[in-house]
Amino acid sequence: MLWILSTFIAAVLFAASSMVNKVAMREETPADRLLPGTFLAGLVVLLLKQGRSLPAPSLPLVLSGLALSLFSMLNCISILLALRGGPVGKVAAVAGSHSIITPLLAWLLFAERLNSWQWTAVGVATAGMILVQHRQGQKAKVSTWVWFGLALLGAIGSSGETLILDKATTLQNDGISGLVWSYLFSFVFTALWFLRRRQDRGQRPFYLGAVDGAISATGMIFFAHALHGGPAGLVAALSTSAVALRAIGGRIFFGERLSLWSWLGITLAIVAFGLVSFFQ
């Protein structure tokens, strides 16, 4: 049961970090101004969690951190590019298909098996995620295959990150050491990109990114603990409840209206957790 609770807490924190991103997007802040602060604050949080400096480098650890970083940035950049040209709700739904891709890849690559109730929970969680985003967004600005392909790349990046973290969790006991290297690499890459673009000296985007990074890194700690106790595919699927929690946050903090479809999606997210809790 602890891994189910950890997955839920991770989803809450991921939803909270998206609220910070929403503030930044309302100010029309370019994402590359946020990312250095995001990854630096995340690195600090992870180092504090470990209670020590960088873990002793070993080739498997450094390589897993590099792979985590690359998949994480693939997810982030692909979805941002997809959102520039595609409908928000549809892009988010395609990107959220990692809830299906991850358990399938875990089954094919790692022989991870889910029982019938768990597969049902995967389907219910995915349906809930799609319904919450039903009819959101604007008309596509580019051809369908462009935004669809980018969103799918984002989903693949998210699945790759989850599966590598799952293996790092097995090797490192809690996976935090792999995340430390991942956030370090990501900070270096995004900081270099930021400097190349020669951005202005305004500090607010950095601070917003730092808040986002601190919250999301804390979420990743709980996500890693969930992977330590539960199947990677199921943890990934249940974590999509962050979409439902994000919708609730938008209603509470930004006065957004929720449609009946959104409330149905939120209900399905709750049902998915219930199925896993009662039919393990």
Image (cartoon, rainbow, N blue to C red):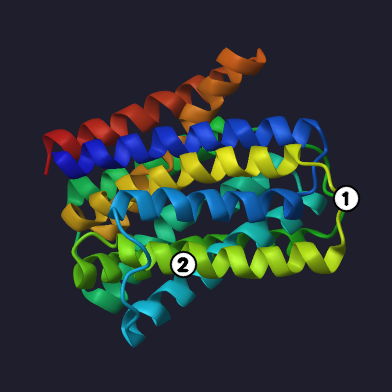
Residue 207, percent across and down?
66, 39
Residue visible at 32% across and 70% down in the picture:
55
Return the residue nearer the eye: 164 or 261: 164
What residue sits right under mark 1 in the picture?
Answer: 200
Determine the image quadrant of residue 178. Answer: bottom left
Residue visible at 73% across and 41% down in the picture:
205
Return the residue nearer the eye: 139 or 80: 80
Return the residue nearer the eye: 234 or 199: 199
Q: Amino acid at mark 2?
A: Ser
Q: CB of mark 2 within 8 Å of CB of mark 1?
A: no
Residue lying at the far bottom of the rendered structure: 59
Determine the image quadrant of residue 101. Answer: bottom left
Q: Amino acid at mark 1?
A: Asp
Check the image and report above or below for 140 versus 156.
above
Residue 27, percent across and down?
81, 32
What residue sits right under mark 2 in the picture?
Answer: 182
Tell me the quarter of the image containing the N terminus. Answer: top left
Q: For residue 133, say whether it is visible.
A: no
Determine the image quadrant of residue 39. Answer: bottom right
Does label 2 or label 1 sit earlier along the sequence?
2
Tell me the quarter of the image containing the C terminus. Answer: top left
Residue 215, percent across and down?
47, 39
The Cα atoms of the two marked residues, 2 and 1, are separated by: 27 Å
Residue 143, percent across and down?
83, 60
Q: Nearer the viewer, mark 2 or mark 1?
A: 1
Residue visible at 27% across and 34% down in the picture:
273
Left-right relation of 40 to 21: left
Check the image and report above or below for 15 versus 213.
above
Check the image and report above or below for 114 versus 153.
above
